Image: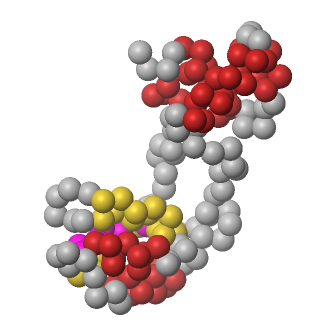
Amino acid sequence: MDQLDARLLVTMRAHPRIGLTELARVLGVARGTVQARVEKLTARGVIEDFGPTVSPAHAGYPILAFVWLQIAQGRLVEAVQALDAVPQILEVHGTSGQHDLFCRVVARSTDHLQDIIAHILASPAVQRTDTTISLSTQIPYRIEPLLQAP
C-alpha cells in the first residue's frame, strides 16, 4: 500500500458516497487509476465493504456492552454457534488470557441486556460471563490515523 492508496482510502472514508470520477478529481489522478486501485484494494481485502455504517444506538439499541466469556473446555465451536444465533451480538473475538471470547453486544435497555446475558449463559458451552457497559465512546472506530502513519 502506497501513499496514493492511503489518500484514496482516507478520502473514501471522509466522503462515503463519492463517485470514482469525483474521487479521481480530488486526488488529481486518472479515473482509470482510481478504479484499478479500488479493485486491487477490494481484491486484497483491504476494502471490506461499501455499505453504510449503521449506528446501533440510533437504530434502537442505545446500550453497548462488552462481554467476556469463559468457555467449557473443548466446546468453543458450540459456544460460537450459540452466540451466532443472537442478533444483538455484533462481534465475537477469540482472546488469550483468562477469558476465551470477547463480545460486543447491544441492547434496548439494561433489562434487555440482562436477558441477552441469560440467553448466552443458557448454553452449556458457556461457563461464565463478565460484562462491562460502555458509558461513552471516547474514540470511535477509526482507521485514518493508521493509514496516514509513516
Q: Which quadrant does the C terminus fall into?
A: top left
Q: Position of residue 69 (x, y in %)?
A: 28, 71
Residue 59 vs residue 35, the one in the foreground: 35
State the residue at coordinates (51%, 83%). 112
Task: Answer above or below: position of 69 versus 4.
Answer: below
Q: Is residue 12 on the magenta stretch?
A: no
Using residue 80 as the reference point, say whether residue 28 is left or right of it.
Answer: right
Determine which quarter of the picture holds residue 18.
top right
Using residue 118 as the reference point, say whether residue 49 is left or right of it.
Answer: right
Instruction: Say whether residue 129 is visible.
Output: yes
Q: Main secondary structure of the magenta part?
A: strand
Residue at the far top in the pictured view: 28
Task: Answer above or below: position of 121 versus 93.
Answer: below
State the residue at coordinates (49%, 25%). 147
Q: Position of residue 16 (x, y in %)?
A: 72, 37
Magenta stretch, residue numbers: 64-71
In the rendered picture of this protein, how many numbered marks are placed on residues? 0
Instruction: Say whether residue 26 is visible.
Output: no
Using residue 113 as the reference point, say whether residue 51 is left or right of it.
Answer: right
